[in-house]
Amino acid sequence: MSQKAFASQADLADKQVSFTRLSEHAYAYTAEGDPNTGVIVGDDAVMVLDTQATPAMAQDVIRRIREVTDKPIKYVVLTHYHAVRVLGASAYQPEHIIASHDTLELIRERGEQDKASEIGRFPRLFRNVESVPPGLTWPTLAFSGRMTIWLGRLEVQLLQLGRGHTKGDTVAWLPQERILFSGDLVEFDATPYAGDAYFKDWPQTLDRIAALGPEKLVPGRGAALTTPEQVQAALSGTRSFIADMYASVQEGVKAGKDLKTIYKDTYAKLKPKYGHWVIFDHCMPFDVTRCYDEVTQYPDPRIWTAERDRQMWEALES
Ligand SMILES: [Zn+2]
């Protein structure tokens, strides 16, 4: 009986936090593959990109920000709707919480279920979950496609470059410094979670990120990337993981195999190349299930509930 513990319930070891300065204005709060938070310090205000999972955890981000600036934290940007990046928002007491309309739609449609599902999957990432206020985190500003915010003389572009990790993915781009904050569209030494993804669209969205020409990049998970070569490596690593999984699942479906067989085949194929990335075993069942759905009959991701999570895990890992 060597069944894997559900999702990341057995992952209890705390990670080492780094607060990396990328430029006069840009910082990355990273923790060895745990969800990252980006920080942009403008002339008159601070913008935070993704919040951490709870207000208690966000307090540590605020502590780091206060080591480099005393400017007010005016804006929180949600790169997408996942609870692990959203539920810490209240700690910053921002004037505005900004997200794409597509992300707002997802919060309305499946925010409650996603919250319960994510807390169940990864309890360590929801430290002091009782500090999360009741209800959901709601954007106060929503945009479609593109929004520019000036932090004094510093231009910040919020861009929807296409679907990928979710349908609402937003990146933040500092054109003057060629620094990009990607959210979970790009990962580095960390397995892309694709349980809510659009596999066919994701590689094209990565091409559009590459076309901006970022020289530095803060990924959704993994260390801050401080050279164009590292940015390239993260983009191509994420792209090949998504493409390899899609090819494997498509091949299995064409051969008439069932989901569990396709899962075992795809796991075996991807493990040698990507098995050393953090949360590989956590992500694979969700990713293959969503990929199978997209290849067969569901253009849009189905809602994960705590119950569906368990049923899927039992079916694929037992
Ligand atoms: Zn995510």
Image (tube, grey):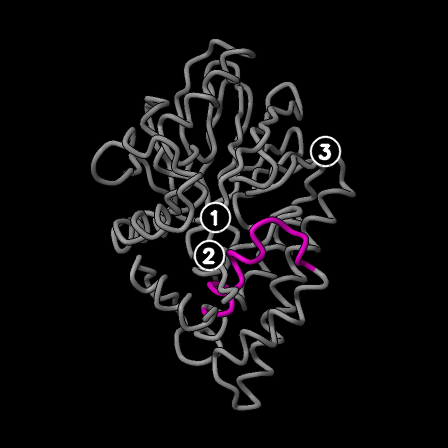
Assess whether mark 2 and mark 1 are in contact (beta carbons under 8 angstroms).
yes
Circle 3 crowding by C-alpha within 10 Å: few under 14, some 14–19, many from 20: some
Between 231 and 259, the residue placed more toward the observer is 259
Q: Amino acid at mark 3?
A: Thr
Which disc, if any, is residue 10?
1
Judged from the image, the secondary structure of the residue bearing numbered disc 1 is loop
Q: Amino acid at mark 2?
A: Ala
Q: Residue furthest right?
A: 229
Quickly name the residue at label 2. 5
Assess whether mark 1 and mark 3 are in contact (beta carbons under 8 angstroms).
no
Name the N-terminal-most of marks 3 and 1. 1
Which disc, if any, is residue 226?
3
- Report the span colored magenta: 274-289
Considering the whole magenta stretch, tell me its main secondary structure.
helix
The CA distance from mark 1 to mark 2 is 6 Å
Between 180 and 226, the residue placed more toward the observer is 226
The CA distance from mark 3 to mark 1 is 32 Å
